[in-house]
Image: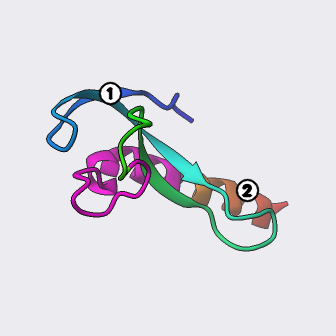
Amino acid sequence: MAARKRQPFECPVVHETVQIQLRTRHPGRFSGADHPYVQCDQRDCQHVDSNVPPCPLSLTMFAEELAEREAQARLRQQNRDES
């Protein structure tokens, strides 16, 4: 899997450049699927990690990386099914 890369983003909420990256929220070991979200390094923002308006961050910003992760997950599942 490719390394998770931080990228700069000019945030209109905090009016400065922040670093963002695609992360995965793990609800619990046996409680269901993981949930991707976009994480911002601006810890003082009231919208941090929410990815809902007025926060401008969304998963569409990382569509390519998400598609790559899904393809790798399918491949891992196929390999497990064949074993």
Is 75 left, or right, of 31 in this rendering?
Answer: left
77, above or below 56, in the image: below
Residue 16 in which image quadrant? top left
Is 18 left, or right, of 22 in this rendering?
Answer: left
- The stretch in magenta equals 48-71
Numbered label tally: 2
Distance between the alpha carbons at the discs numbered 2 and 1 = 32 Å
Where in the figure is residue 72, as x and y percent of width and height? 56, 50
Is 60 left, or right, of 39 in this rendering?
Answer: left
Which callout, 2 or 1, points to the residue nearer the camera?
1
Where in the figure is residue 51, as x and y percent of width and height? 35, 57
Residue kind at label 1, given as amino acid type: Gln
Residue kind at label 2, given as amino acid type: Asn
What residue would you read off at disc 1? Answer: 7
Asked whether 63 falls inside the magenta stretch, the response is yes
26, above or below 32, in the image: above
Q: Depth check: 63 or 50 in front? A: 50
What residue would you read off at disc 2? Answer: 79
- Residue at image position (27%, 47%) is 61
Q: Residues within 10 Å of mark 2 (few under 14, many from 20)?
A: few
Where in the figure is residue 20, as x and y percent of width and height? 36, 35
Where in the figure is residue 66, as x and y percent of width and height? 42, 51
The quarter of the rendered structure image containing the N terminus is: top right
